[in-house]
Image (tube, rainbow, N blue to C red):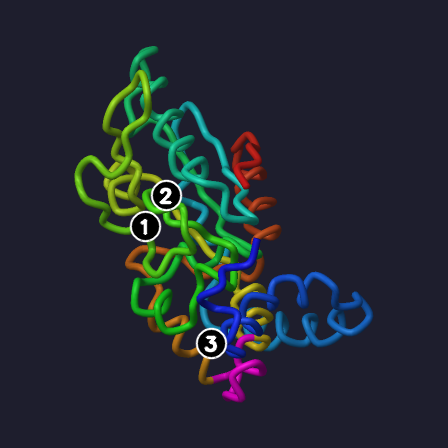
Amino acid sequence: MKCTNVDNNPRRQFLGSIATGVAAMGLSSIISPLSVHAENNFLNGPGDPDEWFKQIKGKHRIVFDVPHPNEIFPFAWPRIFLATNVATGTAEKDCSVVVVLRHTAIPYAMEDRLWSKYNFGETFKAEDPKTKKPSTRNPFWKPKHGDFNIPGVGVVPIGINELQDSGVLFCVCDMALTVYGGVVAQSLNLNPNEVKKDWVSGLLPGIKVVPAGIWAINRAQERGCSYCFAG
């Protein structure tokens, strides 16, 4: 059902259709420009994007692939992985967990300001776990104690900041930031470079921008991470 309170807002209607519009774009229209983008931004850029993955170490290693918002699972599963390893004799410091935010899950890498400004909840179909409505904030950044209470388990610390404190590594897809930033910019008649710059300025502390999400998944697996689809 459509929400009647937004039907008369053309901007919101357009934003709500962005994800569908990007998915419908033909491959021939994006492959060549994306290739140029990747070359210009990484192959000729400073530093080696592979360096970040040298943090992966320890006895048990896993990468969670998050291409879409999926309730609490992209954040609950890393905590469950760590907790059950601790329970079976492997400390958190001896585990490596990588979470790759890509495709329509990229808003989780960004601060509340951008969620509100660009209407991420409606644009990317991301619900607030408490209200079950399109979120106007990043619900997984510094959540309040008790925000996430799992039946039979109780309160669980699954905020991104809480997971980072346990050593979980988060990265976000630059290709998705570029493509979705461009589509949002077009819908709002803004400069795509300025929109992406705004998004990058609002990335959460400790989240690494990688050339592409699928690139990052490959690198994590090459360093011994097993794969888990979380979106």
Residue designated by label 3: 196
In this view of the protein, which residue sits in the foreground, 107 or 95? Answer: 107
At 54% from the left and 54% from the top, the residue drawn is: 102
Residue designated by label 1: 139
In this view of the protein, which residue sits in the foreground, 224 or 173? Answer: 173
Which mark lies nearer to you, 1 or 2? 2
Quarter where residue 205 is shown: bottom left
Residue span colored magenta: 184-193
Kind of element beneath mark 2: loop
First in sequence: mark 1 vs mark 3: 1
Q: Position of residue 138 (x, y in %)?
A: 33, 55
Kind of element beneath mark 3: helix
Contact (Cβ within 8 Å) of mark 1 with mark 3: no
Q: Position of residue 162 (x, y in %)?
A: 25, 41
Residue designated by label 2: 129
In this view of the protein, which residue sits in the foreground, 104 or 203? Answer: 104
